[in-house]
């Protein structure tokens, strides 16, 4: 019986057409943005807000990686107390939604942290060397970073733990036979082999944090440039006119269904009212009055 030969999809025939399609879509969007002044202003404001997103994501992910590695080492420790603490941390934190964690760290954790800092620095504060810490000293951005750090450190800890445990025990025993210390075994033998298993899921966690960084806006963290407020104020008249026209045309559509004569009269009335612009609505912002249904 002849074995079925699987086709190799990783050869030269597997051309990255998805990348070509992505570049074409990006070029089309760039052309649309460049051709429309409003889209250009909106894109400029959003582009300036990417700096906040990148900062929150990078700092939060680095801190979460360091904390997650520490928790993973605690979970692999020989001491049962450290293992139970690490287990408790990962099981509890992984079950808390990021949004709930953001609110809790921002409005409960940060004040508690300030209280602890004042208690520890009480001798320095009483001596007049430093000023007492207040809650407003911890900005909302750093509260959001702490929440992301705590939330993702639990997931990253499990990634590190699984990657370290994937290394064959024979490698560790051979390193012990060579007289290497625990730190040397981890740095020279275990971690170089485990990093190949750790990197792919670690990249997934980074992508997830980039998307979850949008949740920091609920705390009032500005992810966009302050000029966005002025842009919104400039867009308000346009949005108001657009809403007014959609409302009038919606009523006109209701009349068009009634019949040709009534529909034509309603459309003409709407077009006449819209053509007057703001001059016809100085005394009132209500939409133009259409003929009643009984007039049909």
Image: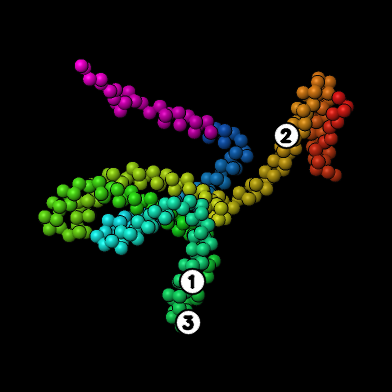
Residue 85 picture location, percent across and down: 35, 60
| Residue drawn 84% across the image and 32% down it | 290
Left or right: where does residue 27 sit relative to residue 253?
Answer: left
Helix, strand, or loop for circle 2?
Answer: helix
Q: Badge 3 local density, few (<14 within 10 Å), some, or many (20+)?
A: few
Rendered-image quadrant of the N terminus: top left
Number of marks in picture: 3
Reading the image, the residue beneath label 3 is 126
* In this view, the mark in front (3 or 1): 1
Q: Badge 2 local density, few (<14 within 10 Å), some, or many (20+)?
A: few
The quarter of the displayed image where residue 87 is located? bottom left
N-term-proximal mark, 1 vs 2: 1
Q: Are marks 2 and 3 in contact (CB under 8 Å)?
A: no
Q: Badge 1 local density, few (<14 within 10 Å), some, or many (20+)?
A: some
Above-or-below relation of 23 to 158: above
Most foreground residue, 13 or 96: 96
Task: Report the coloring of the rendering.
Answer: rainbow
Q: Residue furthest bottom?
A: 127
| Residue drawn 17% across the image and 60% down it | 181
Helix, strand, or loop for circle 3?
Answer: helix
Above-or-below relation of 50 to 88: above
In magenta stretch: residue 9: yes
Residue 101 picture location, percent across and down: 49, 55
Reading the image, the residue beneath label 1 is 115
N-term-proximal mark, 2 vs 3: 3
Q: Which mark is residue 246?
A: 2
Q: Residue furthest right?
A: 295
| Residue drawn 53% across the image and 33% down it | 29
């Amino acid at each position: 019986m002849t074995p079925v030969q699987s086709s190799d999809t990783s050869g030269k025939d597997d051309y990255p057409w998805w990348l070509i399609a992505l570049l074409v879509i990006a070029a089309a969007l760039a052309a649309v943005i460049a051709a429309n002044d409003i889209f250009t202003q909106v894109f400029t404001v959003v582009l300036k807000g990417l700096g906040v997103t990148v900062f929150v994501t990078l700092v939060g992910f680095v801190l979460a990686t360091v904390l997650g590695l520490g928790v993973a080492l605690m979970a692999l420790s020989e001491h049962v107390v450290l293992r139970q603490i690490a287990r408790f941390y990962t099981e509890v934190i992984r079950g808390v939604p990021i949004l709930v964690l953001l609110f809790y760290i921002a409005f409960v954790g940060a004040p508690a942290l300030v209280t602890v800092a004042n208690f520890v620095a009480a001798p320095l504060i009483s001596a007049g060397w430093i000023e007492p810490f207040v809650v407003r000293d911890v900005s909302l951005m750093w509260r959001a970073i702490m929440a992301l750090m705590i939330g993702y450190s639990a997931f990253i800890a499990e990634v590190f733990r699984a990657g370290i445990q994937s290394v064959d025990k024979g490698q560790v025993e051979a390193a012990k036979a060579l007289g290497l210390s625990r730190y040397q075994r981890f740095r020279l033998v275990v971690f170089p082999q485990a990093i190949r298993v750790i990197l792919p899921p670690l990249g997934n966690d980074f992508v997830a944090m980039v998307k979850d960084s949008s949740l920091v806006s609920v705390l009032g963290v500005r992810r966009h440039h302050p000029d966005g407020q002025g842009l919104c104020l400039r867009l308000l008249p346009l949005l108001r006119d657009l809403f007014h026209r959609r409302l009038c045309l919606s009523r006109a559509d209701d009349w068009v269904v009634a019949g040709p004569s009534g529909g034509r009269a309603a459309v003409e009335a709407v077009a006449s009212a819209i053509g007057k612009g703001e001059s016809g609505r100085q005394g009132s912002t209500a939409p133009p009055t259409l003929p009643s249904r009984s007039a049909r």
